[in-house]
Image (spheres, coloured by chain):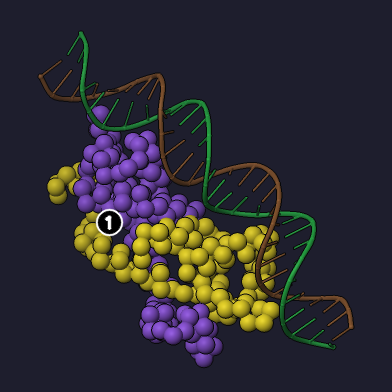
Chain colours: A purple, B yellow, C green, D brown
Amino acid sequence: MNEQQLDTVFLALANSSRRQLLDLIAARPGCTLSQLLSEFDISRIGLMKHLQVLLDADLVIAHRQGRERPLYLNAVPLQLIHERWSEQYRDFWASQLTRLKYAVENQTAAEKVTTRTKDKV
Amino acid sequence: MNEQQLDTVFLALANSSRRQLLDLIAARPGCTLSQLLSEFDISRIGLMKHLQVLLDADLVIAHRQGRERPLYLNAVPLQLIHERWSEQYRDFWASQLTRLKYAVENQTAAEKVTTRTKDKV
DNA sequence: CCAATAAGTAACCTAATGGTTACCTATGGT
DNA sequence: ACCATAGGTAACCATTAGGTTACTTATTGG
């Protein structure tokens, strides 16, 4: 995935209506936009625009059949990001550093992390 | 993480300058904005705005010391998303479906996925 | 055939993004 | 003391996002 693709994927995920739409499509493969419309508070056109963003990001695959257009999740981009993060942050996550935020109580995370990181560096 | 937090995290990641900035901060914990400025083609204020987005998303922690403000990665939000995806898409990724796109050659991914999913459903 | 239904286009509006320049504040070195 | 340096605010601008209503296709069931 190049930078432009990452932009569009993350942008697509940066909206709760779109994430909800993606979840519904994942849960009900082959469903159509009209079927999902009742789950949302926005207009059909609004929802269709969200769908278009997911299509642009290649997170949803659609293939019109007759007057319907069944929708399917394409999890490949999510998996690629997942795998990248696994490699990129393995050491980070293995250390206590990541969990630090939840360990502190009487101090801001910022202060604590600053202190800890200095110890490490 | 609630929906609003997810919005801000994904939005923060939906820009290559910001991802680059995050990578630099991860690679050089305690660095300052001025030190990183030369890596970018945008103005200091532009970069500072990007930093602010990362701070809002809690992906970067900053703690001003004197006239400098050392920056640190906070990977917790990334880890939470990573973990959620692990659970949510485990079955999906375990199946052949995810890899399908790369397996097909003479047919669009959409057509192939449509066919396969119907078999499953 | 024909009307109900699923989808798509066009045009419009407001708010948020992503960038700029100009100016202000505070600290540290010499 | 004082100036170079790090950081921060304000105001502005162009483009994109996120939503709307109104209208247009194009299928399909009866």
Depth check, front residue: A72 or B84 = B84
State the residue position of label 1.
B98
Residue at 36% over, 62% down: B2
Residue at 48% over, 80% down: A108
Quarter of the image with the N terminus of chain B is bottom left
Question: Is residue C5 shown left or right of residue A82?
Answer: left
Question: Is residue A109 shown left or right of residue C20?
Answer: left
Question: Is residue A7 shown above or below C5?
Answer: below
Residue B93 screen position, x and y as percent: 25, 61
Look at label 1 and name its amino acid.
Thr
Q: Quadrant of residue A79?
A: bottom left
Depth check, front residue: A43 or B114 = A43
Residue A61 screen position, x and y as percent: 31, 45
Q: Quadrant of residue B8?
A: bottom left
Depth check, front residue: B71 or A68 = B71
Residue at 41% over, 73% down: B76
Residue at 40% over, 59% down: B4
Label 1: element kind: helix
